[in-house]
Amino acid sequence: MSEPMSALNGAVSDGFVSIREIGPLGMVTLRCKADVKALPKAIKAAVGTGLPALRRVVVEGDRACGWMSPDEYLLVMPYKAVPDALAAVAKTMGKEHHLAVDVSDARAVFRIEGAKAEEVLAKLSPVDFARLEPGELRRTRAAQVAAAFWKEGEGYTLVCFRSVARYVFDLLATSAKLGSELY
Amino acid sequence: MSTRLAKGGRLIDRAAALEFSFNGKRLKGYRGDTLAAALLANDQMLVGRSFKYHRPRGIVAAGPEEPNALVNLGSGGRLEPNQRTTVTELFDGLEATSQNHWPSLEYDVGVVNNYVSRFLPAGFYYKTFIHPRSFWKHVFEPVIRQSAGLGKAPKDRDADRYEQAYAFCDLLVVGGGIAGLQAALVAGRAGARVLVLEQNAHWGGRAPVDGDVIDGKPAGQWVDEAVAALEGMETVTLRARCMAAGVYDHGYVLADEKVADHAPGDGRPKHRLWRIRAGKILTATGAIERPLSFAGNDIPGVMLAASVRDYVVNWAVSPGDRTVVVTNNDDGYRTAIALREAGLAVPAIVDARASPAGDLVARARALGLRIEAGRGIAKVKGGKRVTSVAICLQAGEGAVIDEIACDAVAMSGGWSPVVHLWSHCGGKLIWDMEHACFRPDPARPPLNHDGGALVVAAGAANGAMTADAALLDATAQAEAAVAALGMKPKKAKAPLAEAVVEGPMEAVWIMPQGASIELKSKMWLDYQNDVKVSDVQLAAREGYESVEHTKRYTTLGMATDQGKLSNINGLAVLAQALNEDIPQVGTTTFRPPYTPVTLGALAGEARGEIFQPLRRTPMHGWHEKNGAYFEPVGLWRRPYCFPRAGETHEQAVHREVVNTRTALGLLDASTLGKIIVKGPDAGKFLDMLYTGVMSTLPVGKCRYGLMCNEQGFLSDDGVVARIDEETWLCHTTSGGADRIHAWMEDWLQCEWWDWQVYTANVTEQYAQVAVVGPNARKLLEKLGGMDVSKEALPFMAWADGTLGGFPCRVYRISFSGELSYEIAVPASHGAAFWEALHAAGAEFGVMPYGTEALHVMRAEKGFIMIGDETDGTVIPQDLGLDWAISKKKADFLGKRGQQRNFLASGERWKLVGFETLDGSVIPDGAYIVASGANANGQGNTQGRVTSTYYSPTLKKGIAMGLLHRGPERMGDVVEFNTVKGGTVKARVVDPVFYDKEGEKQNV
């Protein structure tokens, strides 16, 4: 079998911040109501994190769980860990109504790194970064397409749909061109 | 002669000389100059021609209100028409050319219009070009279009780039004069997040030029200290060269930052459009001086008084040795004093008021300046340049008392607060009798979501016309704004500006007040559009009472400056002519943008490769490398066909169809929508969404389904697979994936919120390949890994497994009528899987095929296509799809709609096939003609073609279409109209042209 390939095969671009496509990254969409008792256990079993609060993401090493909507969570993990995570969710949730589905290949993931990473995103997303709280995951748009991002380490991790990976990469690279810093 | 003075110029750096050119002439200026200042320093007063009469036009103002001094800036990819020289910062190598003249600025043929101006009155276009009717399109319009417009639209692609950015703040301060800076200080000290925008490159506005003294310091020093203090505040951002263009609901503001206008080609974006969300907006946008209406007030050398002062003080530019000041207020005296202090002559101050008095008048007297009180200008003399003014009594009719030789005239008709941003969202104005101007009515501000004021005005923009009043007003307005934002302003004393006692101004709308029609025909209100006092009065006589109608009839205020100088004067003249008060006549509507915003900034980064998101499948790179000809499908690009060397697209499509039907074809079907639907109520849910029954579909099987909207019209179709007891996978059309997913969520979230169903759109999780043709099974068996035999995987079944080591889900479905497998693999393996199929398929004659071959093959099979056979007015029954509509179900979306008598009627146009008698292909979009004509005299129709192709399989034209009672008319011959005229005859046949029994796909 071939090795899984991310949409842009790890494209990079350096401007006043650096843009890297990472992945493929393991991702699972988990749909379940927040008050289902088994949910925290299922998330713990799948990615080892707690249940994220409203608009938050909990990061534990190379795994994470993000709040996406009142009944949707995003589980993040290494690509190869997805089958085990799905099995763990299925086992823990048992007969509880839920939907867990592998979306690793439906996504492209970027790292935006550098002291002025926020300035690149502020050109594309209507987000008030001064009010973005620690551990906040923001579902928004990057120019004309849907995107979500959160702060992680010295930069941001941004997720978008795979089919528009090239568009989003070009947007980020254009916005990061030297000399176009905002502040 | 206008020239550069030997000393002074607070904004220029004499050590940094810059070269630029005007109409090819090489000229010199300094860093800090505006283009207008540099032109004046080089005695280039004449800069353009007016729009209608082609009269010589000179620089009038020193700011964004400038109506005349517009130029073509740059060339090629950097050509920008209609650039205001008064706000264009000079840079080395700047190229400018003048506009609206032929053959040259000095000798312009169009000026003949000037001599026939009595034949070009207000409403000229409306009056002249009405008759004869046919002349408008063929004679008048082309001629007017030829002569219209000032600058020429650039022909080359813009060489620069642009971007946009978002910003958020508690208080947005627009204007970096002393009022804006003071407001920002108040808000910043209170801890508010403040963003301060200033359209110019420098801070402080007029105060340093006007010689104001604040807290005992020269205004310039106070400004420097204020800017330094603001820069030191963590929560305050200052942004110069940034013009707030428009205020919109909920505190949304667009601002245009001229990032690199003054340094073209340095790699930075030329402009940046800021999209700001502000808690509150404080406009400290100052005021604009008004011209006076006297005969010849458009002759080059006649300028606004304060602008003359700006040129002298800011850029050390003299407009001429001798400047006559004409005014109706004390501020004009500041210009006389500034000129005198710069060593220039002021032959007279012509003051319309009978007995001027005040500190400034006294100073002028002390300087020995000649004051002509109660006088006005009867006429300015000169052609391309002022040579003298004739003086008369303001109260009289223009009899000349005296003539004074001069090189320039500085006029001041009073000041109008810049109320544009206040007005954009509905802020109302009141008439200020004292200053004869409209100013914001604090009782009727534009409102925010909470009913509070969205905008507050401060300083001169709020009618506080002197420095001391402006600072007090700015402090009070900012404190109130901060308090309204829920913050506490720090107690601090407002800075005190030294008060200057000014006498009252006197409103003067026509000079002299009893001027004859000859004089009024030379009094310009709107310089750019050539609207005179006589035009507005004529409009009033002809019955134009509304200011909005008069504006459009005369074109007053409709030029690129949007009437910044002409509005108030024009409506005052209209009010007089109508015998009404000015507030009753009112103003025209202020709309964004405040000054023009270049289209590049509005487009931002969206150009070239990132003009629009382009969706790519995992195999997109392979398609590109292999010469695919793409077509857009939504935002996707899908291969239409894969032409080989020497092949037309049509030939390629035919080859792909024949090869697929006889050997093996591969289709990239990744764009097909794939939605997972899971839950205890998922079956019930799908039974509501689809016209057929999905709940009874066995695990491991597929079923074709139709979705309708509530009205009963066909909306989408696709194959549904039952994955497990609680899970279905719904395929949608490529264009329908997002729409159908949203449709599902809409019903689940808003209507059936208690049903236990979850959905997930997994369209992009999978690369999907249709392996089609008699050799399809051989290829899969060669790859190996799972049983794909007829017994193990019969038609309309699916199975999970591996093929050639790739994890996959294989669906036995066919949209072509051939033996066909649609294989989904994780998108990360899509490219590799596609290549593996090609490599292994070589011995079976594999070829990729595109969307057009897909269309031809499905049409040969009589399969419908959403968007071809449907257009939002077609129900499944029209298409003979009754078999896919459950008769047993109590309800489904669209069921009631389809029972409405018009849809249930037997008289509808229904789907049939067509074969032309001569074998030709029916043109796309053709109608089936019927006898007679309708009420509009149009020929009647009885149907239309929906899909029409040349069938390479059957070697003739085939078509599907909708025909009145079609299925009852098999064998009839009908006529389709054609593009060329005439008709083509076709026989009504069954829409399934190929393998009606379905033997080929079921092997």
Image (cartoon, coloured by chain):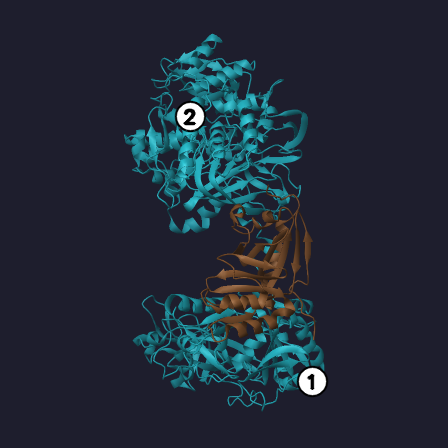
Chain colours: A brown, B cyan
Percent position (x, y) of residue B538?
34, 33
Q: Which chain is indicated by disc 1?
A: B
Numbered mark located on residue B496 in the image: none
Q: Residues within 10 Å of mark 1 (few under 14, many from 20)?
A: few
Whether B156 is drawn above or below B282: the answer is below
Q: Position of residue B252 (x, y in %)?
A: 45, 45
Q: Secondary structure at mark 2?
A: helix
* Residue that numbered label 2 is attached to: B472
Q: Quadrant of the N terminus of chain B?
A: top right
Marks 2, 1 in one chain: yes
Check the picture and name the quadrant holding the C terminus of chain B.
Answer: bottom right
Label 2 or label 1, whichever comes before in sequence order? 2
* Amino acid type, mark 1: Lys
Q: Which residue is mark 1?
A: B782
Foreground pick, B364 / B724: B724
Where is B428 relative to B779, above or below?
Answer: above
Percent x, y for residue A138?
53, 55
Q: CA distance from mark 2 to mark 1?
A: 88 Å
